[in-house]
Image (cartoon, rainbow, N blue to C red):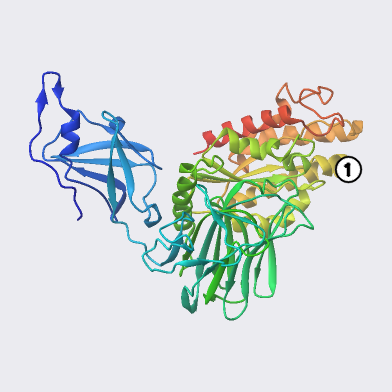
Amino acid sequence: MPGIAIGNCIPFNRGGVNWSSYWATLISATVENAAPTHVVLTFPTAQISLDATDFTIAGFTVSSASWTGAVLTLVVHRPVTFLDLSLTITFVKTGTTATVTNNVAGTNLLAYYDHVQGVDPTKLYDLSGNAKHGTLYATAPPSFTALGTVSTGTEKIDLPALSGDVAAHTIIVGYKQTNKTDTMGQLLVNTGSGNFMNYFFNTAPGLKRFYHGANYTTYLNYVQSPITDWEIISFVIDHPVITVYRNGIRVSQSASAYNIKINSAELSRIGFKGINGVTAFYNKALSDAEQLSAYRSLAAKLRARGVTNTNDAYNSVICDGDSITYGSYASDWYHSYPNQLRTINPSISVLNLGVGGQRINTMLTNAPTVVDPLYMSTGVTKSVVVCWGGSNDLAVFGRSDTDVYNDIASYCSGRQTTGFKVIVLTILPRTDCTAGEETYRQSVNTSIRANWATFADALVDVAADTRLDDFNDTTYFYTDKIHLVDAGYAVVASLINDAIEALV
C-alpha cells in the first residue's frame, strides 16, 4: 500500500496538540477497492478528538469517522470509483492538504478523458492507464479551457481503436451544447458494422436522437428541453437493447440489432458547438448502479470546475402527464414543475414526459413501453413515477368520471407492479369545463382521495390547495384559466417534493 513519509514524534504545546505537526506525521491516506466508501488515514498514534468535521475531501461529503487504534476511517457519501483518480483531503484545523491514494480498480475501463490540457497540447490524454490518447484534429483543433475542450463547429478529436471485440459497451459523454438549435455530431464510433452516434437536429430543437448502425432512436423529445445545460449521457449497448441515461437516470430503452466494437472514435465531431468535459468508454454493459456510480464521479469533477446543474442523482423521478406537466405557459422550461422540482431538491434527477393534450388512457396504453423500462432497481434510493392526468379526458374528450378514475387507478397500480413508487395528483379546475364536466372532475377527485392508498404510494391533492383552487387567480394560473404560471408550478413542485421526501 503506498504511503506518505513522515517523522516519528508528535510535539505538543501548552495549548494541547500541535495540529500542524500532528498532520505532518500522517503515514498514509488510501481508499481500498474492498471498501470504496472508506478513506483510511494512518497515524503513528491516535488522536480521538478528531472526527468527521475535521476533514473535507474534494468531490465528496464526509458522513462519519471512527478510530481503530491509530487508524482513522472516514466514510464518504458515495463509493469512490477509478474515475475519481487521486483524492485531495484537507485537514480543516490547519487548511493543509494531502493526497489520498485511490486503490479502486478500473475494471473494464477502456479509456477515460477529462479534456484537460496535458504536457502535449496536441493530445487528449487517456487517464485510464491504457495509453489510448486522442489526437486533436490538426487543421481545426478544439481549444482547452478550464471546463474542457471547446468546439465551434469545425473541430474534432480522433481517438484510437479501443476494443477489437464485438461486445457490450458503455459510452459516457459529459458536455454542454452552445445553442439548442445547432446541428450536432458530438460523438461518432466506427464499429466495423455500422456507426453509433449521439446526435441533435436543428430541424426540431429539443429532439435528441442517437444512431446505432442505420437506425436511430429518439430518447428525449420536448422542445423546451434545457439542452444548453451540462449533461452527462450514458449509452449502454447490450444486445438486444440500448439503454440511455441522462444525468444518472434512465431516459430511454430501445432495440439494439447487435453489439459493437470500437475501431476508432471521434469526439467533438465536425458540427458540434460546445464544450466536452468528460468522456469514458467501458467494454461491458454497466448496470444501473455501476453507471450511476460513474456518473456521480464525473458529475463531481464537473462541479469542481464550476458546473452547477449536476447532482448525485439519489432519486429517479419520472413525471408523466399532459401540458401542465410539460410546463405550458411557464416563462421557460426551467420553470415547469418537473424542473423546479429538480431545483428544489438536488438529490433528484427528473425526466419530464409531459405531452400537450395527452389523455390518461393514452398514458395508460404507453406506460409499459415508455415508462416501465425506465425503472431503476439499483443505484438510486427511490425510483418514482408522478401521475397527473385526466383533465383533458374530462374537459376535451367528454369521458366519464368512472372511466377516467379507473384509468388513473390502473396506470398507478401498473407502475407499482413494475416496482416504482407512485405519486398520484388530483385534477385542477379549468374554465372550459361544463357543469357536467365539473361534476365529473369533483367525482374523480373524491374517488382518488378515498382510494389512493389502494393503488399509489402517495397522494398530492393539488386541487385541495387553496392557492390552486381558483382558476381566476392569475398569481398562479395563466390567463387561459387552464394552465399555470411559474408560481403555480412552484406550488406543485413543492408539494410533490414533500411527498417524495416522505416516501419510504
Closer-to-camera residue (345/124): 124
The residue singled out by tag 1 in the image is: 396
Number of other residues with Cα within 10 Å of mark 1, as a class: few under 14, some 14 to 19, many 20 or more: few
Closer-to-camera residue (220/383): 220
The residue under the point 52% across, 76% down is 261
Residue 289 position (above or below residue 302): below
Residue 52 x/y as whole percent: 29, 33
Is residue 255 something one can see in this rendering?
Answer: no
Using residue 262 as the reference point, say whether residue 74 is left or right of it. left
- The quarter in which the N terminus is drawn is bottom left
Residue 222 x/y as whole percent: 73, 50
Residue 160 x/y as whole percent: 49, 73
Residue 168 position (above or below residue 11): below
Using residue 252 as the reference point, say whether residue 325 is left or right of it. right
Using residue 95 as the reference point, say whether residue 442 is left or right of it. right
Q: Which residue type does callout 1 highlight?
A: Val
Closer-to-camera residue (130/445): 130
Residue 473's image quarter?
top right
Closer-to-camera residue (36/415): 36
Using residue 241 as the reference point, say whether residue 169 is left or right of it. left
Toward the front, the furthest residue is 139
Toward the right, the furthest residue is 434
Is residue 7 something one can see in this rendering?
Answer: yes
Toward the left, the furthest residue is 9
